[in-house]
Amino acid sequence: MLAPAPDAPPGESDRTAFLRVADVARLDLAGARWVVLSGCGTALGRSLARESLLGLGSAFELAGARVVVMSLWDVEDRWAESWMRELYRARYERRLGTGAAVREASRVLLARRRRLGLDENPSTWAGFIASGLDD
């Protein structure tokens, strides 16, 4: 869900807008190298004619984004934020490729959960994936 536009007409400001897959697919994102969808379940979609899966991540790829980072399931906000912080640190501070940055973010979160004596189930630290072609 998205918040309404700041210039929404009177009476529209309290309504929530939805970002539709079809709207995203029509965008021109040929210049987008990385799109990060940190919301829960952003990699999920629905099956089309038993041949493919179309979801928000797929729509960003259709629109031209080279790489889309998205989640496979619901991730607790605090841990999703930590994972994103580690992802950006690995990608932009350490200059790792996308796959290595995703792996590093997950590795760091798992290590942190172990140090804190928390559940190590992959559902708590491995919910994010990347799809697409890195540089």
Image (cartoon, grey):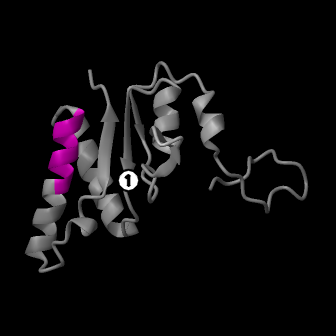
The residue that mark 1 highlights is: 71
Position of 31 with respect to 122 (left or right) is right
Q: Quadrant of the N terminus?
A: bottom right
Q: Is residue 123 above or below residue 62?
A: below
At x 53%, y 40%, the residue is 49
Is 104 part of what is drawn in magenta? yes
Q: Answer whether residue 16 is magenta in the image.
A: no
The magenta span reads: 98-106
Q: How far across and down, in percent of the image, does residue 22 sit? A: 64, 36
Q: Residue furthest right?
A: 10
Residue 107: x, y in percent? 13, 55
- Quadrant of image for the C terminus: top left
Image x and y of residue 26, in percent: 63, 27
Q: Residue furthest bottom?
A: 117
Asked if 88 appears above or below 75 in the picture, the reply is above
Looking at the rendered structure, the kind of residue marked 1 is: Ser
**Furthest-front residue in view?**
50
Q: Residue at x 31, y 65 (%)?
A: 79
Q: Report whether 59 appears left or right of 132.
A: right
